[in-house]
Amino acid sequence: MTTKELKKIEVLALVSKGKMKMTEGARKLGMTRRHLRRLRRVYEKEGGEGIAHKSRGRRSRNAFSKKLEEEIAKLLHRRYSDFGPTFAAEKISEDLGRSISKEKIRQLQIKEGLWKAKKKKEKGYHPRRKRRSRRGELVQIDGSDHDWLEGRGERMSLILFIDDATSEIALGEFVKAETTKDYMRLTKDYIEENGAPEALYSDKHSIFRQNQKEGHLKGDLTQYGKALKELEIEL
């Protein structure tokens, strides 16, 4: 993927997870909200590869052809109408002699009225945290484990350092897993490039503290948390 495609995917990942507003994402990518909304639908349906193919004006190789979709729909109705997406995907892959993903089957089952999409659970109300006013005052760390290569390689995690005041993606890197070593290395890279932030924040409090009780920030500092404390970076 090109740098431009990776940036697009990074922004779409944040928008899809509700960690960046649609308006902010559209501004960063230099496009309208309407166009970003279309890209988000592609991203949520086909993942990063779908975005890359769309950028290059090509149809994703994982997309169904009309003929294949009709063939799978017939199999679903005739043989697997009462099967869930996972088992149906396994059986249809055997029938066709090619790999068909569970997600593709689920989408087609919903389209054919054979499966109901699960409603998202309503989230409890949480007061919106006030955004910091100065660049470098607070940096959010976001780690996303995902099948970024769409089955063409191992799962990876994308670690992003996002400035809270500007929503700027200051640093981003794909890693095999979110390890202490990677967090410390990337933090060092961020500090060398931008200087030390006043504070770091992450939804995953366990990267800073261990033996925590849910809903409480108290707990023993991890190795990473201790390193940040020595640098006088607020957690």
Image: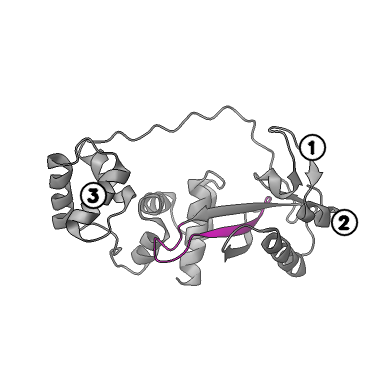
* Nearer the camera: disc 1 or disc 3: 3
Q: Residue at x 39, y 31 (%)?
A: 119
Confirm or deny contact between disc 3 and disc 2 (CB under 8 A). Answer: no
Q: Nearer the viewer, residue 210 or 188?
A: 210
- Badge 1 density bin: few <14, some 14–19, many ≥20, Cα 10 Å: few
- For the residues marked 1 and 2, what is the alpha-carbon distance in whole angstroms? 18 Å
Question: At label 1, which amino acid type do we have?
Answer: Lys
* Nearer the camera: disc 1 or disc 2: 1
Confirm or deny contact between disc 1 and disc 3 (CB under 8 A). Answer: no
- Label 3's element? helix
The total number of labels drawn is 3
- Label 2's element? helix
Confirm or deny contact between disc 1 and disc 2 (CB under 8 A). Answer: no
Residue labelled with disc 1: 218
| Image quadrant in which you'd find residue 219 | top right
Residue labelled with disc 2: 230
Q: Is residue 19 left or right of residue 215?
A: left
**Residue span colored magenta:** 147-165
Query: Residue 152: x, y in percent?
Result: 39, 66
Residue labelled with disc 3: 91
Residue 166: mark: none
Question: At label 2, which amino acid type do we have?
Answer: Glu
- Badge 3 density bin: few <14, some 14–19, many ≥20, Cα 10 Å: some
Instruction: Tell me which numbered mark, 1 or 3, is placed earlier along the sequence.
Output: 3
- For the residues marked 1 and 3, what is the alpha-carbon distance in whole angstroms? 49 Å
Q: Is residue 60 magenta?
A: no
